[in-house]
Image (spheres, coloured by chain):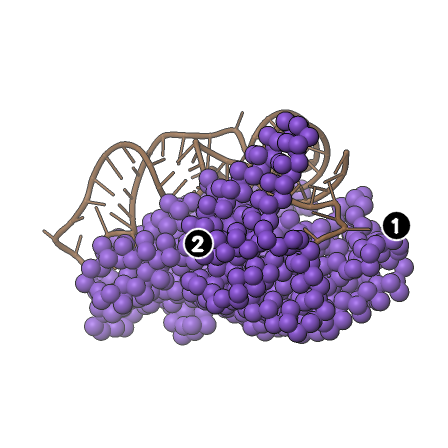
Chain colours: A purple, B brown
Amino acid sequence: MLREECQGLLEKAAEEAHPGTPLPKTKYSPPPDPEMGELSSPVCFQLARTLRQSPQEIAQSIAEKIKPSASELIESAGAVGGYINFKVDIGRFATLVLGTVIEKDGEYGFVKTKDPQRVMVEHTSANPNAPLHIGNARNSILGDCLAELLRRQGHEVLVHFLVNDMGRQVAMATYGWKLMGKPEPEGRAELWVGTIYASVNVVNETTRLNGEIREAEERGKVYEIAELQEELEEYQKAAVELRKRYPEVYDTLAEKLPQIEDANAEIVILNTAYENNEPEATGDVRKVVGYCLEGFETSLGEIGIGFDSFDFESDLVWKKAADDVLEELKATPYAFMDEGALIFDSDKIAQDLGLKERWGLNPDHEIPRLVLVRSDGTTLYTLRDMAYHIWKFGLVNRDINVIGSEQRLAQLQLRLALAAMGRLWMGDNLLHYAYELVYLPGVKMSGRLGRYVTLSEIVEKAEKLAYEAVDVRSPHLSKEEKEGIARMVGHGAIKYTLLSVDSMKTVTFDWEKALNFETNSAPYIQYSHARACNILKKAEERPEPDYGRLTARREKELIMALARFPETFTDAVNELKPGEITAYANNLSDKFNSFYAAHPVLKAETPGLAGARLRLVEATRITIRNALQTLGIAPPERM
RNA sequence: GGGCCCGUAGCAGAGUGGAUAAUGCGUCGGCCUCCGAAGCCGGAGAUCAUGGGUUCAAAUCCCAUCGGGCCCGCCA
C-alpha cells in the first residue's frame, strides 16, 4: 500500500518537473540508513538516459515537486545521491497497518489471486519399498508448503502421491514377504518392508557373487577374484546391519532364498502376474505396498503432512490408460520405429511448435529422443507417466510436480509428448518443481543395501532434543505440555532448515545446525511468538492507543516489517519460493526482539504509549503466526 | 562429446541490475533487582571461483575458463 502511495506522488511530481516523460517501473527498497527514510526509488537513474541529465539533478527536480500533503501516509520526500527517499508519517501509518492486521487477523497478508485455479501438487511419490529418508523429506516439506501457499492465495489445491508399484523393487519386497509366510509388520511398517526388500537384494547378490567367485577360482583369474571379493564385502557389511535391525527377517530370508533355484525369475513372474492383475499377485503386492504407504502416512502425518489421494501406477496399467496413450502417439508424426523399438522424437515436436523458445530452452540443443516401447513389445514407465498426467489434467488445470532435479530431462520429454498429442496446454501448465539432494555428512545412503537415515529417526531425535530444551527452560510445565511444545519445536526446526535453503542448492544436513534452537531457526521465531503471547496474556487492560508516539527506531522498523507481509506472501507464492517467507519471519522476529529488549510494553511511560505498543505486539503475534502457518510450522503460545 | 544446476567471510547461507553484500554458527567484548537470556547490544572477519564484455550502475546480464553435482538407459 505504501508503494502505491509513493508511486502516485512520484508520477505527479515527475509529470510536473518533466512533462511528457513516462515514469519507468522500478523496485522500491528501504534505504541503507533508516535516517534517510523508509522507502526509496532509484527511478532517476533510468530517467537519466532519456532526459540527458544527471540522476542527481533529476532527483532534485522531482523531489521539489513532490507534495507530501497529497498523501495521508507520506511525511516528506527528499533526494539523496540520485535516489528519491520517502519518509513515512509513522503515526498514521501505524494506525493503518496495525488496524488492518488486527482486523484481518487470521487472514492478514493472504492476498487472494484474481485468477483462482484448480492446482495439483504432486509430491513425495517415493517408491513403496523403503522408508522415507531425509531426501524424501525435503520433497514432502517443499510440496506441502507450496500447496499451503497456493491454498492461502485462493486456489483450489489437490495434493497427490503417485505410487510406483509396478517396478521390480516392489516385486522383490513382496516376494520376500511371501517367502517369510506373509507375516504382519513389526515396528515401523515402512522400515520393516524396506528391510525385507534390502535383505532379498543382499542375499541374492551374495549368492550370485559367491558363485562367480567360485567360477573365477576354478579358472584361476586372480584379479577378478579380488574385485568380486571387494564387492562381496559391501554386501556382507550391509547384511550385518540388516540383521541387527530385524534378525528374523534377515535370517529367514538368508535361509530360504538360496534354496530357490532361480529367485530372480520368480520375482519377474510375480511382477508380470501383478501387471496382469492376477488376483493372488494383486492381493499380495497391494498388501505389502499398503504396509509401506501406511508407514509413509504415519511418519509424514507426525509432522502434519498429508495427501488427498494416493494414485497407483498399476491402476493406470489395468485401465489400459497407457495403451491409449501409445495409440495416440503412434498416430502422430513423432513416433518411429528403430531396431524394433518405438521411439518418440522429442526434438522434432519442440522444433515444429517452437517450444524451445516458448519454454525458454537452449534453441541449439537437440533434445534426446525417448524410447516408448522396447523391442520385445513391453512398455516403459514414461508411457504410464504420460497417461497419469493426462488423467491429472482431467482434475486440474495446473500441475506442479515436486521431483528431484535429476529428472529434468524426463520431465521435459513428458511435456513434449503431451504437446505432441495435441495437448499443448498441459505441457504449458505442467511445472517441474526441481530440488537438489540432501546429503548427510559421513553417510552414504542406499535403499538397495537398506542403509538410510529415516525421516522418523530424524523427527524422533528432534523431538527428544526439543524436549530436553523445554525441560531445562520451562520445568514447571506438565509433561504433556512439554511434549506438545517439543513436537512443535522439533518439527519446526526440521522444516525450517529444509525450507530456508534455495531448492536448487544441495543441502548438507547437519544435526547441530538443524536442531540449533538459536537465531535464524524455527525455534527462534516460535520463541518470539511465545514472547508476544506472554505480554498479551499479562496485559490486564488495553488503554486507548496513541499511535503517534511510536516514534522510536525499533518501533518504526517493526511496523515497516509488519506492513511488508502481504507483498512478501504474494512474491513467495508467485515465485513458489518458501524461502521468502522463512527469511521474512526471521527478519520480523529480529525486529520484534530488538523492540522487546529496548522498550517496555506494560510499563510504558504513558497509557497511550502502552496501548499503542500493545497493538504493536498483537499485530506482531498475528503476523508471525500467519507466516509460520504457511510454512506448516506451529506457533506455540509458550515454550 | 552434448546439456542443465551450483560456486558469496573459517563454516552455513540470503541477495538475480541500484546506495555501505543480509543473517546465523564460530570468534572477541558487554547486558538478567525491570513484560521469558531459545534473548539483546557492540567488535573483528568477503579480491561475491577466475578472466574478459554490456551498462550511468554487475554478486546479479553475456562470453570464456576452472572447480563440484546431475542428466543424456530398450531402469523406475
What is the x, y in percent for residue A374?
80, 55
Q: Amino acid at mark 2?
A: Pro
- Looking at the rendered image, the disc whose residue lies closer to the viewer, 1 or 2, is 2
Q: Residues within 10 Å of mark 1 (few under 14, many from 20)?
A: few
Q: Chain of mark 2?
A: A
At x 56% / y 69%, what residue is drawn?
Answer: A287
Residue A563 in view, yes or no: no
Q: What crowding class fits label 2: few (fewer than 14 Cα within 10 Å), some (14-19), or many (20 or more)? A: few
Chain label for disc 1? A
State left or right for residue A398 relative to residue A514.
right
Q: Given contact means CB atoms under 8 Å apart, are the residues at marks 1 and 2 in contact?
A: no
- Residue A239 point in image, percent of width and height: 49, 46
Residue at mark 1 shares a chain with residue at mark 2? yes
Looking at the image, tell me whether mark 1 or mark 2 is earlier in sequence order. Answer: 2
Task: Give the quadrant of the C terminus of chain A.
Answer: bottom left
Residue A189 seen in this snapshot: yes
Q: Residue at x 45, y 50 (%)?
A: A243
Q: Element type at marker 1? A: loop
Find residue A159 and report its horizontal and vertical position in percent. 57, 69
What's the CA distance linking mark 1 and mark 2? 48 Å
Q: Position of residue A530 (x, y in %)?
A: 30, 62
- Mark 2 sits on what residue? A247
The structure residue drawn at horizontal position 69% and vertical position 61%, both measured from the top left corner, is A269
Comparing A400 with A184, the one in front is: A184
Q: On the image, numbered disc 1 is attached to which residue?
A: A339
Circle 2 sits in a helix, a strand or a loop, which is it?
helix
Q: Determine the image quadrant of residue A186.
A: bottom left
Residue A434 vs B1, above or below: the answer is: below
Q: Is residue A545 toward the left or the right of residue A586 in the image?
A: left
